[in-house]
Image: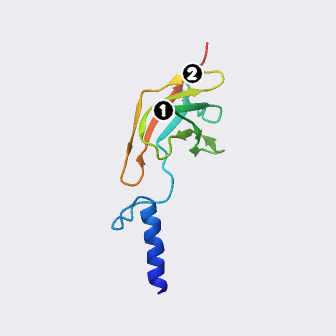
Amino acid sequence: MVRSLSFLLLSSVVIAAGCHLDSFACTAHIQPGIIVTIIDSATGEPRAAQASGVAQAGSFTDSLRPYGYDGQPLAMISRHAADERPGTYTVTVHAPGYRDWQGPRLRVSPGECHVQTVSVDARLQSAP
């Protein structure tokens, strides 16, 4: 009885996550649609901590949020947006002392369980 109940609960979670019973590759984590690595174009130094920005698809706008960290001491290197949301996006990044950066249109496609993440580098140029 306990085994049956456990299987039923697990099956319900898997189905609720939009996954097939025969495929356990699906997870319950939230997949970002877009990851933007933000760096100074001249030095290659990360600038994600100082930056802000948006990903926009039609009337939908999503703020870029902290994502990846690297180095010692840890430095924020990227931001993300469009979690689990397919669409065609324009990404704009703002950072003090830099020109605004706008990337190419990015197509976030749906996958079997999660969106297929698109990554882009925002190479910021110093403002005159």
The span from disc 2 to disc 1 (Cα, nearest Å) is 14 Å
Q: Which mark is residue 12?
A: none
* Dot 2: element: loop
In depth, the one of 76 and 64 nearer the eye is: 64
In the orientation shown, which residue stands out farthest toward the top?
128
Q: Give the residue at mark 2.
A: 100
Q: Tell me which label, 2 or 1, sits earlier in the chain.
A: 2
Q: Secondary structure at mark 1?
A: strand
Residue extending farthest to the front is 59
- Among the 4 quarters of the image, the one containing residue 65: top right
Q: Position of residue 63 (x, y in %)?
A: 58, 36
Residue at 63 percent across and 41 percent down: it is 75
Q: At 55% across and 21% down in the image, what residue appears? A: 125
Crowd around label 2: few <14 · some 14–19 · many ≥20 (10 Å)? some
In this image, 40 relative to 119: left or right?
right
Give left or right: position of 121 versus 72.
left
| Residue 41 visible somewhere in the drawing | no
Q: For the residue marked with disc 2, what is the amino acid? A: Asp
Circles 2, 1 touching at the beta carbon (< 8 Å): no
* Observer able to see residue 118: yes
Circle 2 or circle 1, nearest the eye = 2
Display colour scheme:
rainbow
Disc 1 marks a residue whose amino acid type is Asp
Q: Position of residue 30 (x, y in %)?
A: 51, 52
Residue 89 in the figure: left or right of residue 72? left
Residue closer to the observer: 97 or 86: 86
The residue under label 1 is 121
Whole-percent x, y for residue 118 in the image: 42, 40
Q: Using the image as rendered, state which of residue 2 and residue 121 is in the foreground.
A: 2
